[in-house]
Each structure stands twice: as structure tokens, then as C-alpha cells.
Image (tube, rainbow, N blue to C red):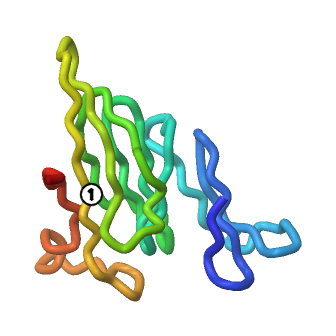
Amino acid sequence: MYRIGPHELLLCYSECAFYIDNAGHRSRPNLLIEWEGQPTNLAFHYPYLIGFDPSFIEIRNVETGALEQVIETTGQRCLNNGQNQTGIYCVMEPFQSHHQYIFQLRMPARSQPLVHDSSAEESSKLALSDVV
């Protein structure tokens, strides 16, 4: 569950996510975020809701429910919930490997909902980076 402003909460389940008001009623009845996979972890960094499925990372826009990006991975899991300003840290254990790789999803600075503009699409994507 994530608080989205003073009057709304985003409830997240393994099948879907949706908004409720403080009284527990659906505040956006036409918006239902249905996952492509079954996330085992979630992170939130406005305007992104990030679902961590065992084989990919699914990034959704919380205002529209739109699938923004899918990042294929193997054996990864989330290490923090996205509440810090620097990004979301994850660990990946590649198949038949005795190593673990730590990486960061760097979050683009954004104070308002995404605008679907093909020229801005590439710059709005989350990026994987090595953690030093």
C-alpha cells in the first residue's frame, strides 16, 4: 500500500493494483493496473510503480496504468522500496553462477505524470547502472 497524496492510497496485490480513498472506496474505478507477471516485490517512485517478477522488472505509470517498460533479468529481487531519491537498488543472481550482482534503477527527475511523446520516450525510461 502506498499513499498517493492526502486522500488516496494505491493498493497493490500480486494480480493487480488500484486506488482507494481514505474511506476504502475505489477512487478511480476505471483504473486497474493488471500485471504482466506476478511480482514478488514492489517499489514506488512517483510516477512509477515497479513490479519485480522473477524473470523481469515491469514498470507502470501509476496515473494511467500504462506499461512503460519491461527489463528482462534473471534471479533478481528488490533491495529497497524506492522511497529514497537516488533510485531503487536490486540484486541479481544469474543462473548457475556463484556471484551476485547489485544494480540500481536510476529514476529520472519527474514532478508530473508522463506525457506520451515519441521524442521524449527514450529519455524517460529507467536505466540500469552498476553500483560502485
Q: Element type at marker 1?
A: strand
Residue 60 location, x and y as percent? 41, 60
Give the farthest residue toward the front: 132
Residue 115 position by quadrant: bottom left
- Residue drawn at the location 67% of the way across and 58% of the way down: 11
Is 26 drawn above or below residue 131 in the view shown?
A: below
Q: Residue 88 falls in which quadrant of the image?
A: bottom left
67 versus 24 height, above or below: above
In the rendered image, residue 14, in percent from the top left (x then y), is placed at 59, 40
Name the side, left or right, on which 13 lies relative to 48: right
Q: Residues within 10 Å of mark 1 (few under 14, many from 20)?
A: some
Residue wearing tag 1: 105
Q: Is residue 19 left or right of residue 40?
A: right
Could you tell me which residue is drawn at 69 percent across and 69 percent down?
9
Residue 6 appears left or right of 108: right
Q: Mark 1 belongs to which amino acid?
A: Leu
For residue 93, what is the image quadrant?
top left
Residue 45 or residue 59, whichever sits in front:
45
